[in-house]
Amino acid sequence: MTEPRGGLSSVADLVAAGLVPEEVRDDIEKVAKRYAIGLTPAVTELIDRADPADPIARQFVPDPAELEAAAWEKPDPIGDAAFSPVEGIVHRYPDRVLLKLLHVCPVYCRFCFRREVVGPGSPTHLAPDVLDAAFAYVAARPAIWEVILTGGDPLMLSLRRLADVLARLDAIAHVKIVRIHTRVPAVDPARVTDALVALFRSCEKSVYVVLHANHPRELSAPAREACARLVDAGIPMLSQSVLLASVNDDIATLEALMRAFVEARIKPYYLHQLDAAPGTARFFVPMERGRALMRELLGRVSGLCRPEYMLDLPGGFGKVPIGPSYLAETRRDDVVEIHDYLGRTHIYRPPEEA
């Protein structure tokens, strides 16, 4: 595992960088005792210090409100533990598993649904015997078609460790897809080296990289160059974002974010409803607001730019699409009422059945 390089990882660092006022230092220290802090130089450079509501700072700079847990928030908001048959594996769907390789990230999001796992005192990565058991679990189940590498951020592993993981997956014939969930290309683009790209190219499985970014400014010139190194090498990229209050919950920002992905040759994949982890209520956007944004997005961007709006059901029951429906629930006289993105109603008569 390789550590973040030259970043901010303590309250003292944040104060020295002018991102936390000295007068709230004691309050932020209390947050730091429970939740990890981490900003890379690439992220720090994106922050507009003249803007007290800067959307980049809001995602990564700790806030005293994080210690105020709402009644509905849970340490494991999407129920991973209930579907973890062996340590490191989450097996919620028959054909795919999550393999949580480590508990380290290049940056620590203030809304992270795994924040209780990656906080201070958590083990950094899976022990060798635990990793062996995880691979044995996958190898023994032919229905597993896809393995999703997550954590933590799997691209925080050293090349040697990552190469070992991919080689062991290559040895499992029924695994066909390796999906890698990461923030690295946006928050630490220098990590996307030629050697890393070559490693992905050498994998016998189909490798997909899914980039997590929430604001168009995260798709900086260095981030786009890092993504281009992957895409130019034939590695498909998808995106995932979280709908966050005062970060991307307005149509102009959301549109710009999705266009930025597509311009970087990244297909927008998921826009997540916030998972209710402790201390994240300040990021909550009502679902109806999210559905309205998705409806508005339909009228502003092409299909290339539209993600699926998703809710991970609490309790471990999986993801469901929650975007707006354009089909009326009622049908009469062999016609269907359909609503367009402006809310206008149209009558559609399906062709007669043969």
Image (cartoon, rainbow, N blue to C red):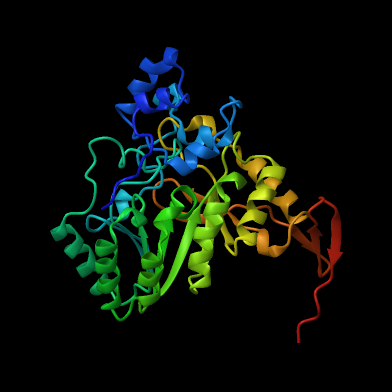
Which of the 4 image quarters holds residue 13?
top left
Q: In the visual, does 314 lie left or right of 343?
A: left
The residue lying at 54 percent from left, 39 percent from top is 46
In the depicted view, which residue is nearer to us: 309 or 177?
177
Q: How far across and how far down the image is residue 170, in percent?
A: 30, 77
Q: Is residue 59 above or below residue 211?
A: above
Looking at the rendering, in which quadrant would you find the C terminus?
bottom right
In the depicted view, which residue is nearer to us: 213 or 189?
189
Q: How far across and how far down the image is residue 81, in percent?
A: 30, 49
Q: Is residue 133 above or below residue 294?
A: below
In the depicted view, which residue is nearer to us: 232 or 204?
232
The residue lying at 64 percent from left, 40 percent from top is 249
Which of the 4 image quarters holds residue 116?
top left
Residue 82 seen anywhere in this rendered image of the structure: yes
Q: How far across and how far down the image is residue 187, in percent?
A: 46, 47
Q: How far across and how far down the image is residue 33, in percent?
A: 29, 26
Q: Is residue 237 above or below residue 125?
A: below
